Structure formats: structure tokens, C-alpha cells
Amino acid sequence: MAQGFHLPEGPKTKRPIGFWDEWFVGMAKYVSTASKDPSTQVGAVIVDRKNRVISTGYNGFPRGVDDLPERLTTRDVKYTMIVHAEINAILFATQPLDGATLYLWPFLSCSHCSSIIINTGIKKVVAPFNYNERWAGSIKLSQALYHEAGVAVKLINRPEDDVRNTPRLSEIVGQ
């Protein structure tokens, strides 16, 4: 054995329950900072069953398309041009996604992205619980799609949020 190197004795130290979910949602938050969208920066991280990162993505215009201010600040134009973070992460993946987990920031995927996510074989989606009136209907539909397709969804509280004035999840999704 190398001098000065010794293996720890005793039982293995285990990470607390939920560690990886919080870790990868935090990574998705960091990835979101690459987005040039002035209103909402979204990040996505896809990991395999052994918690190894397969791919990352953030919301932005397609490759080679200029991030012009008039495109980024005109909502109707932006929405027709932007590629969502989840889709970019799927497109950039270099291996099959069967059984993978998708981590998102700052909220659950829209219903359109959810349909694509389901078709990739991703089996779990983790996102912060974040009520956004603009996306509420689409996110509710996403949850229904995931449930019907057998994709596990885990919504976690964001530590920096003051949840006292946030609607309860059951009030939003009607469960």
C-alpha cells in the first residue's frame, strides 16, 4: 500500500436520503445559468442508473441562430424559436436514455416536452415544486402524462423558497 494512504475502517458512510436528487437539481440550476432567456432560465441534467451524468441542456435558440434582443424579449417570437432545456439535453445525449433520470430547474417540464421525455425511456423526473400560473395547465397535463406512462415524478422543495405563501401541491393538481 502507498505510504500515507489508508482506507477508512468501519461501515461505509452513506449519503442522506434525497442527496442525489438535491445535488442534480442543483446542477440543473447551474446549467440554467447558460441560458440567455431574460425571463426564465431553465436547466436539465440526465443521469444513468449509477448517477453518472449523461447529458445537460438549457433553453435557448437553435445552433447558429442569433440571440437577438428583439427575439428574446418578444414572447410570441421567443416561444416559437426556443428549444427547451429538456429537449436540448435529450438531443445532446450520446447513449440511450432507457431507465435514466431527468433533473430540471426551475420547474417540471411542459406537456409537449413530457411527451418526448416519455418516448425516450426516461423513467424518473425530479424538479423543484414551483407554482407558475403561466405554466400551471401544461404542468398539470405533464403530471397526468407521466402518471399514465409509468414515469415517476418527484417534486422537491427548494431550500431558498419561503413556502409559507406557496399553494400546496394538492391545491394545484387537484389531488
Image (cartoon, rainbow, N blue to C red):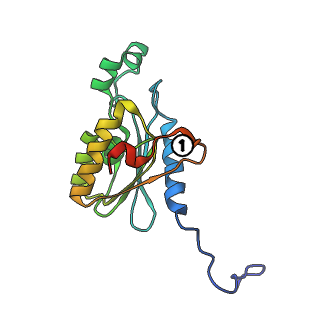
- Depth check, front residue: 114 or 48: 114
Seen from this angle, which residue lies furthest right?
4
Seen from this angle, which residue lies furthest top?
70
Tell me: 26 left or right of 86: right
Q: Quadrant of residue 87?
A: top left
Q: Is residue 83 above or below residue 65?
A: below
Q: Quadrant of residue 151?
A: bottom left
Tell me: 157 left or right of 148: right
State the residue at coordinates (48%, 46%): 28
- Depth check, front residue: 17 or 74: 17
State the residue at coordinates (64%, 84%): 11
Q: Name the amino acid, label 1.
A: Tyr
Q: Quadrant of residue 12?
A: bottom right
- Judging from the image, what secondary structure is the residue with disc 1 in? helix
State the residue at coordinates (34%, 51%): 93
Find residue 166 and report its horizontal and vertical position in percent: 50, 40
- Depth check, front residue: 139 or 63: 139
Q: How many marks?
A: 1
Q: Residues within 10 Å of mark 1 (few under 14, many from 20)?
A: some
Write down the residue under mark 1.
30
Find residue 5 and report its horizontal and vertical position in percent: 73, 79
Find residue 114 and report its horizontal and vertical position in percent: 27, 46
The quadrant of the rendering that contains the N terminus is bottom right
Find residue 115 and report its horizontal and vertical position in percent: 22, 47
